[in-house]
Amino acid sequence: MICAGRASAGRALTVVGVVLLSGCEGRQSVLDPSGTDALALYDLAVVLFIGAVVLWLLVAALFIYVTRINPRAMSRRMGETLIVGGGVLFPVVLLGGLLIYSLPLMSPQREGEAGLEVRITAEQWWWRVDYLLEDGTIVTSANELRLPVGRRTGLRLNAHNVIHSFWVPALGGKTDMIPGRETFMSLRPEKAGTFRGQCAEFCGASHALMAFEVVAMDPAAFAAWLQAEAADASAPSGLEARRGAEVFAREGCGACHAIRGTDAIGQVGPDLTHVGSRVSLGAGILGPTAEDFTRWLGHTESLKPEVRMPTYDFLPPEDIAALAAYLEGLE
């Protein structure tokens, strides 16, 4: 019975260990760094943790010594030496050393290379993304950030209405986004891949549903993508997609959304010029398939509470399907 109990306890600990360790990797884990800044933060956390453990062990050892090993009364001089040396001087030296070590690690994140910059504006509850090119051209996207691998890209962060916080755990640290004040940070991915970012400051009813994708790409692939992203939207192909474009115009969607190359020039909601080629829909909550577009159009307010976009459940199912086909084809 005892052996069986120990075996069960061992299996339980194994399961718990596997579950806990599974959270140490992935596209939104600070313990699986994929960028220069995230790696610096990871190293800093390890050093600070080791320093805290050393400090705790020494203080605990001192406590055990004076209460268990040598509990007899000591001289005033000895007591003052222990208090001043162990309780004041040693922590000040250790923590001061850790502070001196840690402060310079953050400076690269305040710098950016010449050339491309990205302006990101936090809305409720989505992300406006503008790529600022050297020639003054602005390429607008939404809810997705693409970065070249091995290059440090500057990010100019703004917010409307309320405070937000920009955070891509696998690539770098958090930076607040404050209405009326532009903040700056930069990121340098070291691995190609898709990573998940999140608003890290409570900003309202759909705060938890305000995510975004970060796609780190080979520099050549990024340049080709940026050139394609700057182009106007392609004309709808297929009967259903053309009908969807007519529904889009008839329902006044262009008053809120822009689609370059068409009469839609709205600035209230996300730019939809190439929405069909994005990794996600609805700021990270759905995929870019026709089924997901249909679901979003028919259940917008239930999927994202208090969102400004109305639910189009008053449209006939065939109109919603046509509109979804049109949006999916905007690549």
Image: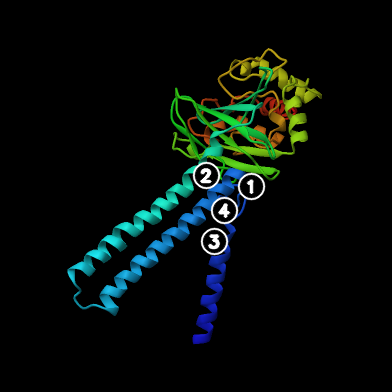
**On the image, numbered disc 4 is attached to which residue?**
31
Kindly indicate the quadrant of the structure image that contains residue 75: bottom left
Foreground mark, 3 or 1? 1
Q: Are marks 3 and 1 in contact (CB under 8 Å)?
A: no
**On the image, numbered disc 1 is attached to which residue?**
34
Q: Is residue 213 left or right of residue 44?
A: right
Name which residue type carries label 3: Leu
Which quadrant does the C terminus fall into? top right
Dot 4, how many residues are within 10 Å of its Cα: few (below 14), some (14-19), or many (20+)?
A: some
Residue under the image location 53 percent in, 71 percent down:
13
Q: CA distance from mark 1 to mark 2?
A: 16 Å
**Secondary structure beneath label 4:** loop
Dot 2, how many residues are within 10 Å of its Cα: few (below 14), some (14-19), or many (20+)?
A: some
Foreground mark, 2 or 3? 2
**On the image, numbered disc 3 is attached to which residue?**
20
Most distant residue in the right direction: 238
Name which residue type carries label 4: Leu
> Mark 1 or mark 2: which comes first in sequence?
1
Q: Nearer the viewer, residue 29 or 324?
A: 29
Foreground mark, 1 or 2? 2
**On the image, numbered disc 2 is attached to which residue?**
105
Residue under the image location 39 percent in, 67 percent down:
57
Dot 3, how many residues are within 10 Å of its Cα: few (below 14), some (14-19), or many (20+)?
A: few
**Secondary structure beneath label 1:** loop
Q: CA distance from mark 4 to mark 2?
A: 17 Å
Q: Is residue 182 left or right of residue 150?
A: left
> Mark 4 or mark 3: which comes first in sequence?
3
**Can the viewer see residue 330 in this picture?**
no
Residue 264 spot, x, y in % from top left: 66, 15
Q: Are marks 1 and 2 in contact (CB under 8 Å)?
A: no
Residue under the image location 72 percent in, 22 percent down:
230
Q: Nearer the viewer, residue 63 or 4?
A: 63
